[in-house]
Image: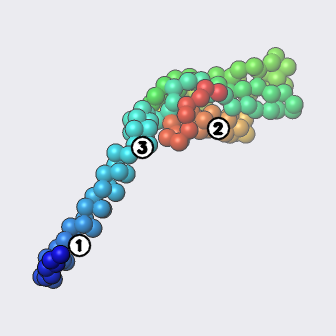
Amino acid sequence: MSSKTRIIVLHMKEVVYTIAFLILAVLLGILIYFMFGPGKSQTTSAAGEGLYTPGVYRSSLTLNKNTFDVEVTVDQNNIQSIELVNLSESTTAMFPLVKPSLESLASQIVDSQSLDDLKYSTDRKYTSQLLISAIEDALKKAENHVSSPPAEQ
């Protein structure tokens, strides 16, 4: 058995360059994993869809133990319509400003596609504010959320 001793000479400059390139390679691998790894396709597809998840969304209102719904219909980027649903005749008789207030607000919202700068008369102030709150709730349900799957309500 003959064993020969080998002596390897490493220059410090070569060791430093090798370590630097290894660190860069690891960082590049991590970056590629986060860019193209699992979950990326879900965020990209949902973010490109629009403001809302298309569908019909409802928000309930209760006035003197009478419950009715404000129904908001949206497509990907627009509010299509706003209507009152399940409004009984007794509620209409007891609260006569509800229906005309919503019609006025709905036309403004559909035209402007915004809940900002809505105009309503002072005699309908509280009714209008109540309806605007219900419309906001329905639109929050319609907003396109990346983390939650779309569901009609």
Q: CA distance from mark 1 to mark 2?
A: 56 Å
Image point 75% across, 19% down: which residue? Answer: 86
Quarter containing the C terminus: top right
Q: Nearer the viewer, mark 1 or mark 2?
A: 1
Secondary structure under tag 2 reads helix
Residue 8 in view, yes or no: no
**On the rendered structure, is 128 left or right of 144?**
right
* Residue position for label 3: 38
- Between tags 3 and 2, which lies in front? 3
Q: Give amino acid for label 3.
A: Pro
- The quarter of the picture where residue 95 lies is top right
Residue at the (84%, 27%) spot, across then down: 66
Left or right: where does residue 34 sit relative to residue 136? left
Identify the mark nearer the N-term, 1 or 2. Answer: 1
Q: Label 1, on which residue? A: 19
Mark 1 neighbour class, 10 Å CA radius: few under 14, some 14 to 19, many 20 or more: few
> Can you say whether 22 is above or below 136 in the image?
below
Measured as percent of width and height from the top left, residue 49 is found at: 42, 32
